Image (tube, coloured by chain):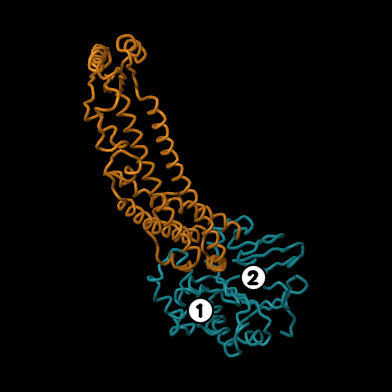
Amino acid sequence: MIDLDKIAYSYGGGDLLSDVSLSLAPGSFHFLTGPSGAGKTTFLKLCYGELIPTEGRATLYGRDLAQMSRDDIAMLRRRIGVVHQDCRFLDHLSLAENIALPLTVSGRSPHAEAQNIGDLMAWCGLSHRADARPPELSGGERQRAALARALILSPDVILADEPTGNVDWEMSQRLLALLTELNRMGKAVVVATHDLALIRLAKQRVQARVLRITDRRLQLAGADL
Amino acid sequence: MSLLDQFRDLLRGDVRADRVVPPSGMAARLTLAVAGAMAFLAVFALALSLATGRIASQWSHELTRTATVRITAAPAEMPALTEAALRVLRSTEGVESARALTPEEQKALLEPWFGSDLPIEALPVPQLIELRETRAGYDAEGLRLRLGAEVPGAVLDDHGRWRRPVVQASQRIRALGLLSLLLIAGVMAGMVTLAAHAALSANAQVIAVLRLVGARDAFIARAFVRRFTLRALWGSMTGTFLGAMAILLLPGMPTEGTLLTGIGFHGAAWLWCLTIPLVAAMAAFFATRAAARRNLRGLA
């Protein structure tokens, strides 16, 4: 689905990532760790086409990212669910409208998919918050809502950037439970986090590979994880 | 997507897609106000342009086929000279008719300057003869020579001396009116472009979210274009309505055919007002579309 072949990314004359290779297969689960500023977010952005590698070749669903137009990338993003640490909602829309946003931009009617939206919100435990505006939500609710929005188009890949960064341990476990359930459904999941406790917990539940970004390179993490 | 498709989308609308852009904002209010003010001014520019065009055409048409012979002589000689001049005129090829103005008509001509109680009989007022030419026209130079030879003191005035500059001035005012309309449309397009740029910049986060969830540039641009086009349409409709009302309420004056009383719309000319909101909406559509494309390219 997503293949990165010896890619590098430089910005402003400095290398942020170098010689990174990874292939995301359906049903795979990867954790991405590393210190702050190591390049985890940059790596994820390369995976969903927000950034184009300055070297190497990134292939999304069999197509070379460097050869794709902005519209092509937009179409492919509908097959990749992205969850950001800051969630990024449209504050003037209700939570239900925010979750339905991918449907709206892809020309599908949220009315026709009301059942799906309702089910997804119930699955994320947000049914009672459908009409709330994003600023009214707690950190955990925002993260779950961001996950619901990422899933509304049934993507094959879920990329989550520090999804538990702003929530307590209990909520982190709840989010992890949702992500592992999605993985069992056959979706590829990549979670960037520096929460080692969460990674250890996840490894008890799913077959997860842990990757670490060190010195701009991607490495398989040691057995201590 | 073709331009026609974009217009169709614009008219059809999509409430959900429209909602992705935050509803309020300084830029949107500015567009509404500018469109209203510009449309109000456009109504006046259009009215002035139509009025001057109409007056130029009227003066030009009415005066082209008439001329005046002025006879200056002692009162005792005046009847004979008038009769002689009429004979010359009636026998001139190209002159359709000629008649001497009555004392009442001459008094009416002087009334605006001297008042209604003018004792015209006591004044050495020249006798005026009005002549109307045929479509083929007459030889003005030949007629002048004949009048000079047969009717001493008779002067032919074909009105060209003052008609030409008046018609020219009217035509220029009309051209200035049209130029004003173009400038108004240009200024409005410029203001809408600035407002659209400001709105796009202010909504950079919204655009980032839309892109994150898979929105294509055309979708994002459409949401902004529709917002600004409709604002410009509503604003200009209001401005046009108020401008038309102001024209309608202009005080009437007894004299017809002057520039001041001619300002306004007559009959079907009112329909021209309907073009103002349409032109404003089109200007906003193209201005926002260009601004959105440029801005989205820059944000990529």
Badge 2 or badge 1: first in the primary sequence:
2
Looking at the image, which is closer to me, A167 or A176? A167
The quadrant holding residue A56 is bottom right
Q: Which residue is mark 1?
A: A134
Q: Residue furthest front?
A: B122
Tell which subunit mark 1 falls on.
Answer: A
Q: Is residue A91 above or below residue B82?
A: below
Chain under numbered label 2: A
- Residue B192 left/right relative to B104: right
Q: Quadrant of residue A110?
A: bottom left
Residue B190, position as x, y percentages in the image: 52, 52
| Residue drawn at 35 percent across, 25 percent down | B159
Is A58 drawn above or below residue A222 in the view shown?
above
> In which image quadrant can residue B100 be found?
top left
Q: Residue B5, percent across and down? A: 42, 52
**Residue at image mark 2:** A44
- Is residue A19 at all visible to an observer of this figure? yes
Q: Colour of chain B?
A: orange
Q: Colour of chain A?
A: cyan
